[in-house]
Amino acid sequence: MGIFTGIIVYLMLYWLSLFWVLPWGNKPIGTTEGGKAVASAPENPRILKKFMITAVLAAVLWLIVYYLIDIKLFDFQEMAQQMREEDLK
């Protein structure tokens, strides 16, 4: 995996992880005062902590994906070559 591909895979895993982590521990405000917030808005979103958790989780997932590609469990070049050969028949 090249550096550009590695960065793209990490960013994809980061966004996937972010949407998984965002709802953790959210409790809605419930009542609002003078319409300052929506009742379903989280009371204390702890967004920085969630960004840090997401970064670590994405890094761990990236290492797993890198390892699986490195041991050639998923050999994308071979798959592409087989698809090309099938198309040429």
Image (cartoon, grey):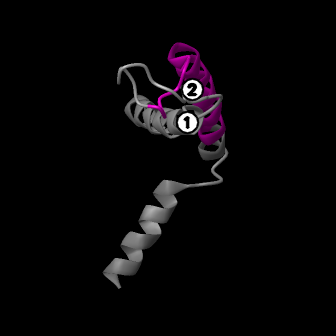
Q: Amino acid at mark 2?
A: Thr
Residue 2 horizontal/vertical position (percent): 43, 34
In the orientation shown, which residue stands out farthest toward the bottom?
Answer: 89
Q: Amino acid at mark 1?
A: Ser
- Where disc 1 sits, the SS reads helix
Quick check: 51 above or below 7? above
At 49% from the left and 64% from the top, the residue drawn is: 79
Quadrant of the frame with the C terminus = bottom left
Tell me if residue 15 is in the magenta stretch.
no
Label 1 Cα neighbours within 10 Å, binned few <14 / some 14-19 / many ≥20: many
Q: Is residue 81 left or right of residue 26?
A: left
Q: Is 53 in front, or is 61? A: 53
Residue 87 horizontal/vertical position (percent): 34, 79
Residue 18 horizontal/vertical position (percent): 51, 33
**Label 2: which residue?**
54
**Label 1: which residue?**
17
Residue 40 disc label: none
- Where disc 2 sits, the SS reads helix
At 59% from the left and 37% from the top, the residue drawn is: 66
At 35% from the left and 24% from the top, the residue drawn is: 35
Gap between marks 2 and 1 measured at Cα:
6 Å
Q: Is 11 in front, or is 51? A: 51
Q: Is 25 in front, or is 39? A: 39
Q: Contact (CB < 8 A) between labels 2 and 1? A: yes
Label 2 Cα neighbours within 10 Å, binned few <14 / some 14-19 / many ≥20: many
Magenta-drawn stretch, dominant element (helix, strand or loop): helix
Q: Which mark is first along the chain, 1 or 2?
A: 1
Q: What segment carries the magenta color?
A: 39-66
